[in-house]
Amino acid sequence: MKKITFAIVWLVCFLLLLLVCDQFLLRYPGADTPMLSEFQSFYQDLRQRVLALEYHSQPHSVQQVISEHSTKKIVSKGQEDENGAQDETDIGRYIYVDENNTLNFADSLEQVPANLRASARKLDK
């Protein structure tokens, strides 16, 4: 019991020290100290990015990824979006099996070996 209490006390002290360092880096006006001000701006930017990761959750299932992707604006083949880039969903994707019975994917029919092009299948959208 004595060891557990000792460990808990040190854990609380460590967490308090982290909290003090965090608040120091956020609030201390270090504009006159060049290295401190640069480190403070780095730390504040890092802290904002890490905290933003918690609030902007990523999809957790394949269905969520598909539904988010399908709701995006689909540009028809040959057209460009407002940024001037072509939509990648219109590019033909092919699947084929090689001599070792390994399933392979290719972005175009030219990437499929010549002897296997007859067995290559185009994937649907």
Image: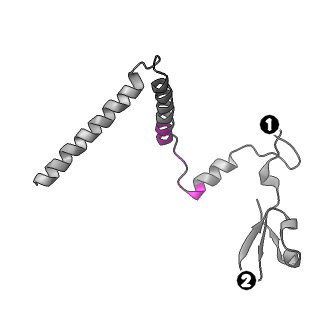
Find out whether residue 7 is within the magenta segment.
no
Which element type, helix, strand or loop, lies under badge 1?
loop
The quadrant of the image that shows the N terminus is bottom left
Query: Which one is nearer the viewer's eye here, 21 or 66?
Result: 21
Upstream in the sequence, badge 1 or badge 2?
Answer: 1
Outermost residue toward the left in this view: 2
Find residue 97 and report its image quarter.
Answer: bottom right
Measuring 51% from the left and 45% from the top, which residue is drawn there? 57
Is 88 left or right of 110, judged from the image as shown? left
Which of labels 1 and 2 is toward the front? 2
Q: How many marks?
A: 2
Q: Relative to residue 25, is residue 14 depicted above or below?
A: below
Is 14 left or right of 6, judged from the image as shown? right
Q: Which mark is residue 83?
A: 1
Residue segment shown in magenta: 50-63
Which element type, helix, strand or loop, lies under badge 2?
loop
Q: Relative to residue 118, is residue 85 depicted above or below?
A: above
Q: How is the image coloured?
A: one colour
Query: Which one is nearer the viewer's eye here, 23 or 36?
Result: 36
Percent position of residue 25, x then y:
40, 28
Find residue 21 and report its image quarter.
Answer: top left
Find residue 30 and report its image quarter.
Answer: top left
Percent position of residue 84, x then y:
83, 39
Is 97 left or right of 2, judged from the image as shown? right
Outermost residue toward the top in this view: 32
Is 2 left or right of 124, judged from the image as shown? left
Q: What residue is shown with label 2?
A: 100
